[in-house]
Image (cartoon, helix red, strand yellow):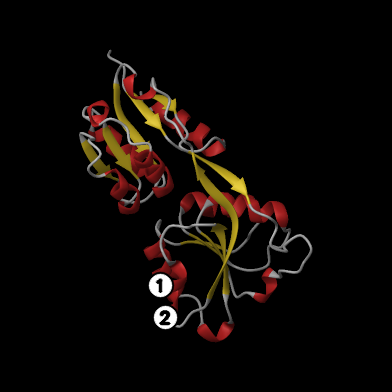
């Protein structure tokens, strides 16, 4: 059987290791090429208590990374958590939160989810996540009369070069992009279009697909829903 190789562009960590195991179980050989890395930002006051999560009506997390960094800084678990999707919700439950709801997998779906559950008179919600998050959750919620306070806990930094061998791997058929930040980092590296003409890009969302359009991929494919299971479904369709 010929090799079926896929590039995995997630940052180093447990999530990437889990993705590689899933790919192997499906008969794909994953080559891990992280395009971004996470860097912690200074504690905004969670450890000292200067920032009190109990003052919020809810805690919002748009990434598992943001959830993990919150949990490392604070033992507070006394407010409902609304997570962007299943992976972030799972991280919240693992961290000890009892009230956890999932918001549909992307920022727009999360905004609609929150608009149906939060009350303007109950005060602000706190959004913990990246320094430069995808979408404009605060702006979306403002349209419903809801106030969201964004508290960045980490930043995503792009890597500056792609290993020369990555795009020349025998049997390479696709590259997986789990986040818009990875797609932007890849586009910024300006790979030669000829190196991409036989490769599909499988992306988690429209926001992740957009930076990859016009680069020279054989096709830029989007998961039917913004989660890894549906990304892997895109791979399965390639045969």
51 left or right of 64 in image: right
**206 versus 144 height, above or below:** above
Quarter of the image with the N terminus in it? top left
Give how far apart the Cα atoms at labels 2 and 1 are: 7 Å
**149 versus 215 height, above or below:** below
Q: Residue 128's x, y, as percent?
A: 58, 61
- Outermost residue, right direction? 48
Q: Do residues under tags 2 and 1 come within 8 Å of each other at their CB atoms?
A: yes
Q: Residue 101's x, y, as percent?
A: 51, 62
- Outermost residue, top direction? 1
**171 versus 220 height, above or below:** above
200 left or right of 98 in image: left
Quadrant of res 100: bottom right
Q: Tell me which residue sits at (33%, 24%) in the image.
A: 167
- The residue pinned by badge 1 equals 140
Q: Residue 79's x, y, as percent?
A: 64, 69
Q: Tell me which residue sits at (29%, 50%) in the image.
A: 210
Q: How many marks?
A: 2
- The residue pinned by badge 2 equals 144
- Outermost residue, bottom direction? 121
> SS of the residue at dot 1?
helix
């Amino acid at each position: 059987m010929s090799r079926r190789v896929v590039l995995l562009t997630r940052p180093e960590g447990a999530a990437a290791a889990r993705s590689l195991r899933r790919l192997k179980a499906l008969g794909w050989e994953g080559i891990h090429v992280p395009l971004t890395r996470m860097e912690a930002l200074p504690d905004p006051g969670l450890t000292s208590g200067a920032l009190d999560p109990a003052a919020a009506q809810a805690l919002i997390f748009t990434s598992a990374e943001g959830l993990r960094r919150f949990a490392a800084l604070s033992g507070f678990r006394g407010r409902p958590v609304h997570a962007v999707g299943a992976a972030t919700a799972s991280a919240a439950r693992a961290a000890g939160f009892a009230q956890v709801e999932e918001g549909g997998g992307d920022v727009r779906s999360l905004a609609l989810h929150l608009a149906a559950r939060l009350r303007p008179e109950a005060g602000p919600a706190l959004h913990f996540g990246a320094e430069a998050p995808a979408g404009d959750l605060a702006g979306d919620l403002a349209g419903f009369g809801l106030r969201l306070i964004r508290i960045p806990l980490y930043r995503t930094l792009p890597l500056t070069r792609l290993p020369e061998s990555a795009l020349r791997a025998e049997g390479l058929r696709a590259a997986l992009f789990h986040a818009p930040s990875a797609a932007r980092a890849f586009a910024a590296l300006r790979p030669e279009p000829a190196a991409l003409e036989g490769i599909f890009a499988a992306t988690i969302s429209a926001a992740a697909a957009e930076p990859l359009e016009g680069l020279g991929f054989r096709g830029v494919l989007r998961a039917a829903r913004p989660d890894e299971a549906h990304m892997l479904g895109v791979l399965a369709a390639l045969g």
